[in-house]
Each structure stands twice: as C-alpha cells, then as structure tokens.
Image (cartoon, rainbow, N blue to C red):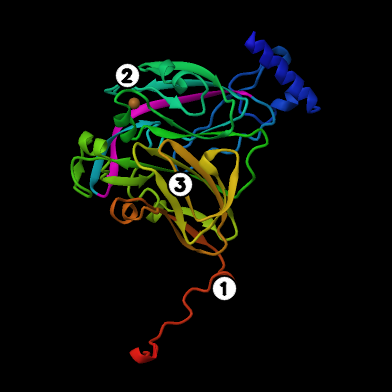
C-alpha cells in the first residue's frame, strides 16, 4: 500500500513538472530497468566516496529509491607517523564513506560486516526517523549482511555511527561518518566540496609512541585523548593530502564530529565562513569565524577563497592542533590580490621610546 502511494506521488510529481515519467528519470544511474509504464520510483545505487571527497549533488527533482551498500572493515591503518591503530571502519576509511541522498528518498540500507571482523556491528544514522536510527535493524555478525529501509524525512547533514555496546569504544575506533540529505532544491552551487570529520582517539602509548597502539578504555572514560584528528590520521589533510582550491572559488566543507567525547571549535586560519549551516540544519548564520560542532553533530561551512595561500583547518581548542594532531591544510593557488591581502610590507627596527615619554 505504501509502495502504491509512492508510485502515485511520483507520477503526480512528474506530471506536475510537465514531464513524462521517462523524462523525469533521465540522467539517473539506474540499477535495473523500470517496470512497464515506469510507474515506480527510480532505483539508484548511491555513489559513496572516501574522505575528503564528496559524492556529486543528486540533481534530482523527484524522490527516488536509493540503495546504500556499506561494508564494515576492521583493519590496521596509520594514525600518525610510525604509529598504527586497529580501526573499525564503515567502508575502509575514517570517517566512513560519505552518503548523499535527497529529502523524500526511500533509502534501502544494506550493512555488511566483513568475514574477517572480530565484532558484531550495526549503524545508527541520525538521518533516520525510527528505533535506534536503524541500529536494532542492522545488528550484523561477521560475514553477515542486514537490511532496513527508511524515508529521508528531514534535510540536513547527519552523523552516522556504530551503536554496538560498548558504544563509546566502537565510535572511538573510528565507526562514524556523514550522510547528507539534500533539500529538494539542493544546496546552493559551489565550486568545490570536501568532507572533513573530527574524532578523538585513545591509545595505550603516549602521543607519537611508535608501533601498533591498543585502545585505552581508561583514557577514553577519563576523556583524555592521545590524538584529536581530522579524517582519522595525522597528515590526512596535510602535505600531498592537503585540500586544493583556486583563488575565487566557492568552497564548501561538510564538517562532522564523531567524538566520542570532545566538541570541536572548528576554524580555518585566514578565512571567514560566509555561511555556516548551524549544526548541519537548514538555517545559516553569516560571517562566522569559529563554529561549534558537538560530538555526534555537524556543520556545513561555505566560503570563498579570495586570495592564494595555505589556510589551516584547526580545532581552536588549540593545544589539540599543535600537540594532538588536529590540523589540516587548504592550499589555494591563483593570482595575488593586494587589495585584499598584501603579505608583509615591511619589517624593521624602530626607535625606542624613553620610559619617561611613554
Ligand atoms: Cu561497531
């Protein structure tokens, strides 16, 4: 009955837009030919991306059935130079694969747990309206696959995470990511979109201690992270991995905070956010220097890189940046514009003022 309602809604919407159902479906990535008459929601396989990349806009003016397939993989990966960690991941990366759908979409979610996993896992998507955000429906043993379906009722940028007990440990091991539910009209167009997500990590060894470092439950409970990182590793957004843009381009960061414990004071040194979609919702604030991102929350920040330079992504709780790894670079090339920023114009000694003349 529900499917029938969707079909009718789709037809009504397509006709209302003055197009045939076939036209409405044009340009979509199809998993199977629609049934005769095409009186059915388009079925699309979601394009998932590894950070810092973001899937392209949905560019749809009708809702669709979107199939998301995500595999949980437990694996050792570098967390810092010479230091590795056994991460638990959604899709093999920290944060997990970026998912992009549209408000009104019906999302068929398939969660796989790799055969060589040691733990059962599940997923709680904050974009889901329903018990546990899907966690109960996706209890998945190693080597198994589960499925549930939800309707993306609310637009916004949402965190997803594993919710298997001990929940904090699964999150601390890297089990989180972002799902964007676009509003029907989409987000304003920009030139570059990137995916950045902060997380705090707790290792037995101290910061920089080499080798494979086990998880420290004690440090996690005390909320004393060894590392606070963007995209799961020191250096994930620096050097050759720096984000790239050109002067004059409009840039959007989808920023998340997986926690499990800390809140983030997200700031880009040398830039001002033209718009911040506060907490990843529909309303935006303008002209923002630093935006607060709660654990299990997000923000969308838009700005124009007016002049070239290296802009530094930080958590402005600044000891984290210089002593725990919370550092990224946006490298902007292009023409200097000295009307906006000159760089150093002079550097010289000046005549001292006598104390009595001060
Ligand atoms: Cu898990």
Foreground pick, 275 / 69? 275
For the stretch drawn in magenta, what is the main secondary structure?
strand
- Which residue matches tag 3? 292
* Residue ranking furthest to the front: 356
For the residues labelled 2 and 1, the Cα–Cα distance comes to 58 Å
- Which residue matches tag 2? 142
Ligand 1 - quadrant of the structure image: top left
Foreground pick, 47 / 293? 293
Mark 3 closeness class: few <14, some 14–19, many ≥20 residues within 10 Å? some
Query: Is label 2 in a helix, a strand or a loop?
Result: loop
Q: Which is more N-terminal, label 3 or label 2?
A: 2
Quadrant of the frame with the C terminus: bottom left
Asked whether the viewer can see residue 275, the reply is: yes
296 lies left or right of 250 = left
Q: Nearer the viewer, mark 2 or mark 3?
A: 3
Query: Is label 1 in a helix, a strand or a loop?
Result: loop
Residue 194, which numbered label? none
Query: Is label 3 in a helix, a strand or a loop?
Result: strand
Q: Which is more N-terminal, label 1 or label 2?
A: 2
Report the residue at 54% width, 20% height from top.
150
User: Is 68 colored magenta in this rendering?
Assistant: yes
| Magenta-colored span | 64-81
């Amino acid at each position: 009955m529900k499917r029938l309602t969707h079909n009718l809604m789709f037809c009504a919407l397509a006709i209302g837009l003055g197009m045939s159902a076939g036209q409405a479906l044009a340009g979509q990535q199809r998993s199977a030919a629609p049934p005769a008459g095409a009186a059915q929601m388009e079925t699309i396989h979601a394009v998932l991306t590894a950070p810092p990349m973001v899937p392209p806009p949905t560019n749809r003016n009708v809702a669709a059935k979107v199939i998301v397939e995500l595999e949980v993989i437990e694996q050792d990966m570098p967390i810092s130079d010479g230091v590795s960690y056994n991460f638990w991941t959604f899709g093999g990366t920290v944060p997990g694969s970026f998912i992009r759908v549209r408000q009104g979409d019906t999302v068929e979610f398939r969660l796989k747990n790799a055969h060589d996993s040691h733990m059962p896992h599940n997923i709680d998507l904050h974009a889901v309206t329903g018990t546990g955000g899907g966690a109960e429906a996706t209890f998945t043993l190693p080597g198994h696959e589960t499925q549930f379906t939800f309707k993306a009722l609310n637009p916004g940028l949402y965190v997803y995470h594993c919710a298997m007990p001990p929940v904090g440990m699964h999150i601390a091991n890297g089990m989180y990511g972002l799902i964007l539910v676009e509003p029907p009209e989409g987000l304003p167009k920009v030139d570059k979109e990137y995916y950045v997500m902060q997380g705090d990590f707790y290792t037995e060894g101290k910061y920089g201690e080499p080798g494979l470092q086990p998880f420290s439950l004690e440090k996690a409970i005390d909320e004393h992270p060894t590392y606070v990182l963007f995209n799961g590793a020191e250096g994930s957004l620096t050097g050759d991995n720096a984000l790239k843009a050109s002067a004059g381009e409009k840039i959007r960061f989808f920023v998340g905070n997986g926690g499990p414990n800390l809140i983030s004071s997200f700031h880009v040194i040398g830039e001002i956010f033209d718009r911040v979609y506060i907490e990843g919702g529909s309303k935006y604030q303008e002209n923002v220097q630093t935006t607060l991102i709660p654990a299990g929350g997000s923000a969308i920040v838009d700005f124009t890189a007016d002049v070239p330079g290296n802009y530094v992504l930080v958590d402005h709780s600044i000891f984290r940046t210089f002593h725990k790894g919370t550092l990224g670079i946006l490298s902007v090339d292009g023409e200097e514009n000295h009307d906006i920023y000159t760089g150093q114009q002079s550097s010289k000694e000046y005549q001292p003022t006598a104390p009595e003349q001060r």
